[in-house]
Amino acid sequence: MKTKTEIKPYKDLDDATCGVAKTIKIIGSKWTMLILRDLFEGKKRFGELQRSLTGISTKTLTVRLQELERDKLIKRKVYPVVPMKVEYSLTPRGESLKNIIDDMRAWGDSH
């Protein structure tokens, strides 16, 4: 008797063996793709990102930026001036997501 292949729930996917699961784990949080989209345009300050992302809270933006920095997709540069100036930009690893973002934009525009 054949057994059905069990489909694992999203949270149980093993990102060590599934590239899709690993990618979703890194960039699948709400707002993350939109932050990356904005950073593909160039360096941005916190306030610029917040104005661009209508509806995002300060706390959520802070957390997402910390996660992206932890995952080495963005870098944070602090300038020693008063008031403090901080800029966010993509790392080479973050830049490697450009095709994914472009494909998502194209798909969304055509559907």
Image (cartoon, rainbow, N blue to C red):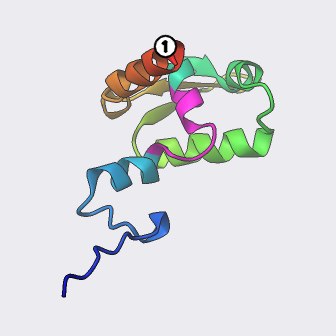
Bounds of the magenta segment? 27-36
Disc 1 secondary structure class? helix
- Given residues 16 and 3, the one toward you in this image is 3
Where residue 96 appears, as percent x and y from the top left, is: 30, 28
Residue drawn at the location 35% of the way across and 54% of the way down: 22
Rendered position, 61 above or below 21: above
- Residue under pointer 1: 110
- The answer to whether any part of residue 50 appears in the image is yes
- Given residues 111 and 32, the one toward you in this image is 111
Residue drawn at the location 49% of the way across and 13% of the way down: 110
Q: Residue furthest left?
A: 1
Rendered position, 15 above or below 110: below
Residue drawn at the location 37% of the way across and 69% of the way down: 7
Question: Which quarter of the picture shows residue 64?
Answer: top right
Q: Residues within 10 Å of mark 1 (few under 14, many from 20)?
A: few
Q: Amino acid at mark 1?
A: Ser
Q: Residue furthest front?
A: 1
